[in-house]
Amino acid sequence: MPISVGAPRLLLRRLREVMAERESAQARLDKVVVLIASNMVAEVCSLYLRRRDSSLELFATEGLNPEAVHNTHLKAGEGLVGLIAEHGEPMQFADAQVHPAFSYRPETGEEVYHSFLGVPILRGGHTIGVLTVQNRTQRHYSDEEVEALQTTAMVIAEMIASGGLVVSEEGGQEARREQSARFTGVTISEGVALGHVVLHEPRIVVTKLIAEDVELERRRLAQAIDELTGMIDGMLERGDLQRAGEHREVLEAFRMFAHDRGWRSRLDEALLTGLTAEAAVQRVRNDTRARMLRQIDPYARERLHDIDDLSNRLLRVLAGGAGTAAAGNLPQDTILIARTMGPAELLDYDRQRLRGLVLEEGGSASHVAIVARALGIAAISQAKGVLDAVEPGDAAIVDAEGGELHVRPTPEVVSAYADKVRFRARRQAQYAALRNVPAVTLDGARVSLNINAGLVFDLPHLDQSGADGIGLFRTELQFMIASTFPRLEQQTRIYKAILDAAGERPVTFRSLDVGGDKVLPYFRVNKEENPALGWRAIRMALDRPALFRTQVRALLRAAHGRELRIMLPMIGDVAELTAARTLIDREVTILKRHARPEPKKLLVGAMIEVPALLYQLDRVLPLADFASVGSNDLMQFLFATDRGNMLVADRFDALNPAALLALRVIVEAAARHNVPLNLCGEMAGKPLEAMALIGLGFRSISMAPASVGPVKAMVLSLDATDLWVRLQELLACTSTSVREELKSYAAEKGVQI
Ligand code: PEP
Ligand code: MG
């Protein structure tokens, strides 16, 4: 006889009463199984829980032999119970005993029961136990009955998690959560940080599981879903994605699921069994997580990840706020963990409390990576599965030298890292001592070391690092964190603040380099097949001169009475340089016409990052006041290797002889035309690569502020002429990289790298 619709609610209410009783955990468990059996009109109800060794132990039963409790153990995958645990899904059998997986245990006396229904007890997507009912007769359990048993299993899982039901070692996931874990990722900002986990998107702990008024819970859930879908639709319509750190595809998926009938009807069913709105969301989320963890197809897994995220957001809306952890109380040593995040969101955190950042997604060229580097926090990305394995408050170590995260580290690991941190601090102190020492090689070559910047909070780095100037100011970063196009006055104010902070030191402003992977939330562009090769940088500036001219005007105004250096990104040929120059000259003429104060000196430079330019250097360089190699882009185009694609990131090395030869060609051309040359890609900030650059003849390079110290230490210990002799031999070799040879050179000659 199937159960009636009201029965599950009654069952949940009775379970709550049992929970409130002052009895031993075992006595309560015993009552729980009796309640379930009678509510579901079953002769048997048994509860198995997972032990540390992964076996499933019978913890309580109504109907089977009581002697079997704590004596019957099933190994992982053994019997029908083991099968359910393994699959993490409900299963039913009209005649269980004929199933090949049936494992007969004489001590239980279960031979007289034929039909069998079992559901996993899930926590965080992992099976921590199995709940079963059995009947003598061969029968089919209805969908409602399966649903009701699943809901009961979820309530039991939450009771176990809160320590209210069983006090022992069980709970596979709980046990795993106490163990140390190590994750590997990709370094996006160097450093080592020890601290405690904060989840960027806080998880809501559902404490009230059982509804007092089902109708009320239904209304609450409907309202929360409306609010959530409104938020998602709004974000998609406004295109306000980067600011909120969202990927469009993820939001599109959210929208799809939020409107998905399947998801909604699963929530409704869970509500009908008598759960609160929060518990219903949690129920559906548990099932999703269980499926996600078993899913092998990466695409399907990703989609399940989206539903999981969506459920978490819905829980936050129900809790009255969808905000991030930035607004909460942060520990002094926050290790922030997120699936993905936008640069503006990272900037919302109190820098003083941030030590490290770990992302499950995103590459080292992503915008949040640029901000993490600017903030100087240790950060890694691509740390898959981290969110599943951490709890807020867990101790953690981000090793962004080795690209690792250690969660709940053992004392040995902590002490090894404490040593490493002390070592780094000593090294930093040595670098700080070099702050006012000019970077001159052993053979007397003065090398100008500059910083790359892009945000106002980068400015103190100029003094702290002892750099000679700002070799690359990425103006687009300011545009990327804004929610609307910065107006002329706003831009002027920012550029002026930067020039004021730099004082006598030169600042090279790069004109807007948007497009490709740098998206402005408020600026719609058509989807492109190959955005890196698409409508970006100078191409956009020349097609939309109004944007470019406004920026140039702001720069001219900000620089009155001072030197102004404007650098043009992605110049591909002579015509682009002359066209941009004409636009700049026109702004200067307007300035003169209005008798506004002018810059003392205006220098216009070209970035060398499009390989075609290598064959036009003799025509382009005479038209430029200076040039700067954008090695990030130049290398990605030279080697046809997407700089943001982790799959191909290791396929080429900037210390490949072909790359070095290309750089040498540029050095020689700049010398021929007497044009000042700089290099501002990431390779300038790595001591070994920087050593090669100086060997090739570069005398000005620009890097992240934290790299100035290590690179200066290298310069001070290098004989550039001697290295050039060695490099000439290496340039002729056929290997993919001369990295090892250069390392040996440095070791042999005592160059600090
Ligand atoms: C480069 O391409 O090397 C460069 C400095 O510019 P960006 O990284 O901003 O493209
Ligand atoms: Mg570039």
Image (cartoon, helix red, strand yellow):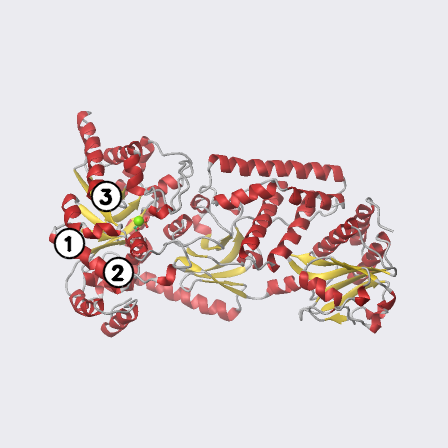
Residue 88 figure quarter: bottom right
Q: Position of residue 512 (x, y in %)?
A: 31, 40
Crowd tier of the residue under label 2, counting other residues whose Cα lies within 10 Å: few below 14, some 14–19, many 20 or above: some
Which amino acid type is marked by label 3? Gly
Which amino acid type is marked by label 1? Ala
Determine the residue positioned at 33% across, 47% down.
533
Determine the residue positioned at 82% across, 70% down.
68
Crowd tier of the residue under label 1, counting other residues whose Cα lies within 10 Å: few below 14, some 14–19, many 20 or above: some
Q: Which residue is mark 1?
A: 669
Q: Which residue is mark 3?
A: 503
Please indicate, yes or no, whether residue 651 appears anywhere in the rendered image. yes
Q: Is 418 placed above or below 225 here? A: below
Marks 2 and 3, how far apart in space?
A: 36 Å
Marks 1 and 3, how far apart in space?
A: 31 Å
Residue 387 figure quarter: bottom right
Look at the numbered disc 1 and give the secondary structure of its residue.
helix
Please indicate, yes or no, whether residue 163 appears anywhere in the rendered image. no
Rendered-image quadrant of the C terminus: bottom left
Earlier sequence position, callout 1 versus callout 3? 3
Q: Is 693 placed above or below 410 here? A: above
Q: Position of residue 634 (x, y in %)?
A: 28, 53
Which amino acid type is marked by label 2? Ala
Q: Is mark 1 within 8 Å of ligand 1?
A: no
Which one is in front, 517 or 122?
A: 517
Q: Which residue is mark 2?
A: 659
